[in-house]
């Protein structure tokens, strides 16, 4: 069982307990949101993580957050029709009441902390937290931490470190389109065009007709 799925199960259990024991609702609901946010950070493509996080946000009265999570759910799985139903309800609540709870009142993860430091240009602290998050996960797999860390190194011009991070992440998820593209961009930035070409061709095998990848390959010629 992967780390994201374990957190989804915990998040749902906390959410169910919050509904069954209203006197404990705040603690259990906070724990639910925290577990589900972490699940979505570990695996942003997890439909269940986004859907259940939307339910938790809706329960908390953070309707704009619920709307966002339900929209992500449907973008990942358009056939999840019940997500469309709860999305419509959340939109009506938000239109009528606004938010009863603000984003700043939602439980914060270590990733939230790292992103905040990065926005404040405290890059060393952000890098430290990204690495701590990666090391804290069983199996050391955490998509968002790896991706954010690699992109941070890339944006700072440290292409060697960026390449190391993306390569390490691909050791866990060798067919991840985003990671493959980011590593290809890193190779391109260092003039290693054949390595970039190979990776972008692999991206096309995974996502034929991807316009961005086709444009990257065109620019290599």
Image (cartoon, rainbow, N blue to C red):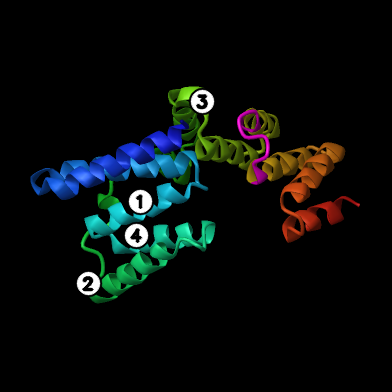
User: Please, is residue 131 above or below residue 33 in the view?
Assistant: above
Q: Earlier in the sequence, mark 4 or mark 3?
A: 4
Report the Cα–Cα distance between label 2 and label 3: 41 Å
Front-lying residue, 119 or 93: 93
Report the Cα–Cα distance between label 2 and label 1: 22 Å
Membership of 35 in magenta stretch: no
Please name the residue that numbered disc 3 is placed on: 140
Front-lying residue, 159 or 3: 3
Front-lying residue, 213 or 111: 213
Q: Earlier in the sequence, mark 3 or mark 1?
A: 1
Please name the residue that numbered disc 2 is placed on: 97
Helix, strand or loop for disc 2: helix
Mainly helix, strand or loop, the magenta region? Answer: loop
Please name the residue that numbered disc 1 is placed on: 52
Membership of 170 in magenta stretch: yes
- Residue shown at 42% from the left, 40% from the top: 39
Task: Specify few, some or many for label 2: CA neighbours under 10 Å numbering under 14, 14-19, or 20 or more.
Answer: few
Q: Earlier in the sequence, mark 2 or mark 1?
A: 1
Report the Cα–Cα distance between label 4 and label 1: 9 Å
Q: Earlier in the sequence, mark 2 or mark 3?
A: 2
- Residue shown at 26% from the left, 70% from the top: 98
- Residue 66, disc: 4
Report the Cα–Cα distance between label 4 and label 3: 29 Å
Q: Earlier in the sequence, mark 4 or mark 2?
A: 4
Q: Does the image show residue 108?
A: no
Task: Specify few, some or many for label 1: CA neighbours under 10 Å numbering under 14, 14-19, or 20 or more.
Answer: many
- In the image, the segment drawn in magenta is 169-177
Of marks 2 and 1, the one in the foreground: 1
Helix, strand or loop for disc 1: helix
Q: Position of residue 19 (x, y in %)?
A: 17, 50
């Amino acid at each position: 069982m992967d780390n994201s799925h374990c957190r989804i199960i915990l998040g749902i259990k906390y959410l169910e307990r919050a509904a069954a024991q209203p006197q404990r609702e705040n603690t259990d609901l906070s724990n639910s949101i925290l577990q589900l946010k972490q699940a979505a950070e570990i695996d942003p493509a997890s439909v269940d993580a986004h859907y259940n996080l939307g339910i938790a946000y809706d329960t908390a009265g953070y309707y704009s957050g619920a709307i966002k999570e339900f929209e992500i759910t449907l973008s990942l799985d358009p056939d999840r029709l019940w997500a469309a139903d709860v999305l419509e309800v959340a939109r009506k609540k938000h239109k009528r009441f606004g938010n009863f709870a603000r984003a700043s009142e939602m439980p914060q993860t270590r990733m939230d902390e790292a992103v905040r430091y990065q926005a404040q240009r405290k890059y060393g602290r952000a890098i430290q937290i990204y690495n701590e998050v990666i090391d804290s996960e069983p199996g050391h797999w955490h998509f968002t931490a790896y991706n954010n860390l690699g992109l941070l190194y890339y944006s700072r011009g440290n292409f060697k470190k960026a390449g190391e991070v993306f390569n390490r992440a691909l050791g866990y998820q060798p067919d991840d389109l985003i990671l493959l593209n980011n590593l290809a961009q890193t190779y391109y930035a260092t003039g290693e065009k054949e390595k970039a070409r190979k990776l972008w061709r692999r991206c096309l095998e995974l996502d034929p007709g991807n316009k961005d990848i086709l444009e990257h390959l065109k620019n290599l010629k």
